[in-house]
């Protein structure tokens, strides 16, 4: 038996792994192993707060705690991950968001579990770099400034290149002069080590907020109706120095194809039931305020088919009006707001775990960037939309059926347990919410080819608790 055990260990060797601890006096080699899992056991048994496992080629493959650097590739190359607990793949791009929270390394030392923008995913160790928390790093973080929630996103952990976004009103539980960390945008911490421990036990007991926070502009569904107008859009563009309509590329600094185009967005909203201001916000983000080459030469306002590895594959439309309609009908109604479509994760902007951001863009904070523009538009219009649109947003504890009527005749679609539930409340009556359906309803079922007008569903209020 001893020989069999020895041979088993011998044949399952998978490299040379050195366990190294770190303290104020420097580093100390704690042991060398030919099985990653044995090295991991050793590291986890150490009393020291900081330790790591290094491969014989110098690659760090595991940490006691720390940060994952995703900005290790060219800007046009994405990093793939497998969502924890599933076989579903996702993708992100380190050029838009460099840091993720390190959670664990697989038993064979080849995959790292990380969290970024709400998603927990397994990524190849070959695609990332690992850093301890005591390294000098420029990390993404949240702050409060002038009553707004600011997300400062790191795009280079070592050089300190950042991008700051004002994404919505600051929640009551946050205060100025404090740095908060969050890799989902729902729960916030002042200590990354405490955050990691909570996430590993699937709890948020030590977060600064007791209940999950959902930014209105990031989680309002596309099936809401804006109160903003063409004049509101133009007023915002004028603040950005844009005062005229662009006709040719390159355009002047004060020109944009979006100037005076707001009425078209609103017309399409009236045709399809897709929020015009949300579409306008995406267009601002994707077309560089309506001044990009694709917006002017391809009539492509939304980056459709402009893939990271080949942006010149961007779709060409017949006109700007055609592009806006196709975005609303072809992309939103038929895909991202269609519970029967593989792209559907909720029709809000969201993050990499929920909403359109899951599949629309490689930028892990695309949803926050779209929310930033919507917030800017609405704030300059006295927050008409936040005051007039009533939404309910929560993490579903159990499956939430959306019924065709209050008689429970049939179910239109179901919001799965443990996923984000966000919907527009049309009215409350007795024990029911009447909500704006995510997709058109015809003959008591989802039918994306039908008109969206007056498409509603019904949710039992008790199902939300």
Image (cartoon, rainbow, N blue to C red):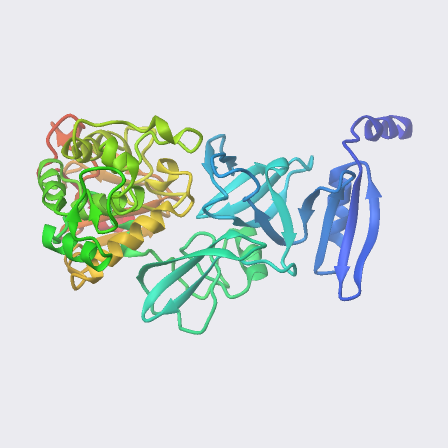
Pick the front one: 217 or 353: 217
- Taking the image as drawn, is residue 10 in sight? yes
Q: Nearer the viewer, residue 373 or 173?
A: 373
Residue 434 visible, this angle = no
- 285 to the left or right of 68: left
Give the residue at x 90% y 30%: 2
**Height in image: 209 above or below 113?**
below
The residue shown at (46%, 31%) is 88
Question: Viewed as shown, does residue 422 lie left or right of 329?
Answer: right
x, y percent for residue 412:
21, 33
- For the view shown, which residue lies furthest in the right direction? 3
Image quarter of residue 438: top left
Total labels drawn: 0
- Compared to residue 417, the image places residue 377 above or below, namely below
Q: Quadrant of residue 250?
A: top left
x, y (%) of residue 246? 18, 42
Q: Which one is nearer the viewer's eye here, 55 or 38?
A: 55
Between residue 4 and residue 156, name the one nearer to us: 156
User: Where is the N terminus found, in terms of image quarters?
Assistant: top right
**How far across and how far down the image is residue 445, in percent?**
17, 29
Where does residue 199 sit, x and y in percent of width and height?
53, 52
Question: Picture quarter containing residue 310?
Answer: top left
At 27% across and 31% down in the image, what residue appears? 335
């Amino acid at each position: 038996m001893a020989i069999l055990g020895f041979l088993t260990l011998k044949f399952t060797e998978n490299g040379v792994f050195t366990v190294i601890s770190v303290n104020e006096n420097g580093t100390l080699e704690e042991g060398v192993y030919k099985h990653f899992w044995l090295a991991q056991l050793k590291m986890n048994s150490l009393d020291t707060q900081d330790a790591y496992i290094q491969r014989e080629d110098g690659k760090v493959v595991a940490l006691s705690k720390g940060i994952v650097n995703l900005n290790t590739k060219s800007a046009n190359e994405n990093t793939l991950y497998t969502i924890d607990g599933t076989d579903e793949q996702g993708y992100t791009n380190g050029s838009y968001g460099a840091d993720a929270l390190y959670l664990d390394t697989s038993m064979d030392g080849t995959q790292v579990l990380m969290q970024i923008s709400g998603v927990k995913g397994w990524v190849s160790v070959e695609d990332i770099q690992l850093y301890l928390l005591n390294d000098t790093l420029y990390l993404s973080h949240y702050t409060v400034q002038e009553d707004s929630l600011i997300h400062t996103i790191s795009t280079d952990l070592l050089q300190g290149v950042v991008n700051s976004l004002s994404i919505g009103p600051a929640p009551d539980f946050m205060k100025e002069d404090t740095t908060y960390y969050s890799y989902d945008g729902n729960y916030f911490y002042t200590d990354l080590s405490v955050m990691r421990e909570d996430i590993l036990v699937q709890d948020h007991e030590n977060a600064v907020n007791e209940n999950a926070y959902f930014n209105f502009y990031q989680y309002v569904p596309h099936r809401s109706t804006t109160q903003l107008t063409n004049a509101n859009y133009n007023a915002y563009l004028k603040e950005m120095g844009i005062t005229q309509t662009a006709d040719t590329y390159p355009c002047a600094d004060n020109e944009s194809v979006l100037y005076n185009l707001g009425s078209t967005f609103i017309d399409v909203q009236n045709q399809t039931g897709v929020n015009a201001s949300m579409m306008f916000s995406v267009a601002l983000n994707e077309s560089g305020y309506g001044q990009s080459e694709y917006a002017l030469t391809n009539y492509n306002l939304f980056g459709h088919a402009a893939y990271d590895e080949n942006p010149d594959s961007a779709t060409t439309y017949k006109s700007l009006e055609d592009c806006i309609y196709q975005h609303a009908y072809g992309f939103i109604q038929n895909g991202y707001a269609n519970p029967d479509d593989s792209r559907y994760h909720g029709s809000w902007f969201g993050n990499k775990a929920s909403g359109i951001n899951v599949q629309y863009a490689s930028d892990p904070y695309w949803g926050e960037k779209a929310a930033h523009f919507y917030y800017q538009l609405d704030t300059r219009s006295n927050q008409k939309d936040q005051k007039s649109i009533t939404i309910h947003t929560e993490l579903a504890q159990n499956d939430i059926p959306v019924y065709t009527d209050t008689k429970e005749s049939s179910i239109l679609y179901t919001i799965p347990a443990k996923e984000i539930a966000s919907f527009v409340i049309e009215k409350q009556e007795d024990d029911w919410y009447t909500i704006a359906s995510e997709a058109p309803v015809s003959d008591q079922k989802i039918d994306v080819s039908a008109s969206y007008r007056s498409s509603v569903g019904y949710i039992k209020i008790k199902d939300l608790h």
